[in-house]
Amino acid sequence: PDVCKHIRRPGKWTVLMDNIDWLKERGLAKLINFRFVLQRDNYRDLNKYADLVKTLGCRGVVTALIDWGTWNNHLTENPDAWTIENGSFSDHDVLDPQHPEHRHCIDQLKQIQDRQDDRFVLEYSVKRYL
């Protein structure tokens, strides 16, 4: 719930789960596809995500973080207020082998891959690091 609130702001976990329950009640759970965009602030929750997907009977996809220009590429000498608060793209891109949390992220991904659950897919943008 806290990760959802932070990553998908202004997302509300209870509203999301109520909407999913509504779909499940109508037999539509198999049509739900979750996308998990892997980044520094959520990769530690991969196993919880996989459990949720399995419990709900949905499909889950893990994708790499893509730089859409939301963050600066690297911290500059004089960063603006937004960059000071949120960091740079490279701060969030845990798939970058230079990122300090890269190895831990890869370990999390391997755990997911070892589940061999066909409802849970690692896109090539993620799988190529394994």
Image (cartoon, rainbow, N blue to C red):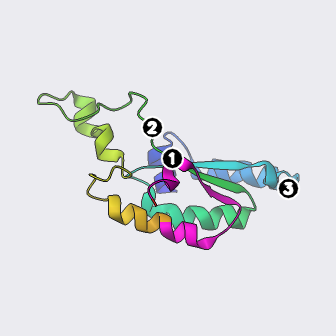
Disc 2: which residue: 66
The residue under label 3 is which amino acid type? Glu
Question: Residue 20 appears at what percent x and percent y?
Answer: 73, 52
The residue under label 2 is which amino acid type? Ile
Q: Give the mark nearer the N terminus: 1 vs 3.
A: 3
Disc 3: which residue: 25
Crowding at label 1, few (<14), some or many (≥20) Cα neighbours within 10 Å? few
In this view, 98 is above or below 50: above
In this view, 68 is above or below 108: above
Image side of residue 110 versus residue 77, left or right: right
Crowding at label 2, few (<14), some or many (≥20) Cα neighbours within 10 Å? few
Mark 3 secondary-structure assignment: helix
Magenta-highlighted residues: 110-129
Mark 2 secondary-structure assignment: loop
Q: Give the mark nearer the N terminus: 1 vs 2.
A: 2
Disc 1: which residue: 125
Mark 2 vs mark 3, CA separation in Å? 34 Å
Residue toward you, 73 or 58 = 73
Q: Quadrant of residue 105?
A: bottom left
Instruction: Kindly report which numbered mark, 1 or 3, lies closer to the viewer in this rendering.
Output: 1
Residue placed furthest toward the left: 77
Question: Residue 41 appears at what percent x and percent y?
Answer: 39, 52
Q: Quadrant of residue 76?
A: top left
The residue under label 1 is which amino acid type? Ser
Q: Disc count in the image?
A: 3
Mark 1 secondary-structure assignment: helix
User: Is there a contact, CB below 8 Å, between mark 1 and mark 2?
Assistant: yes
Question: Residue 13 appears at what percent x and percent y?
Answer: 58, 52
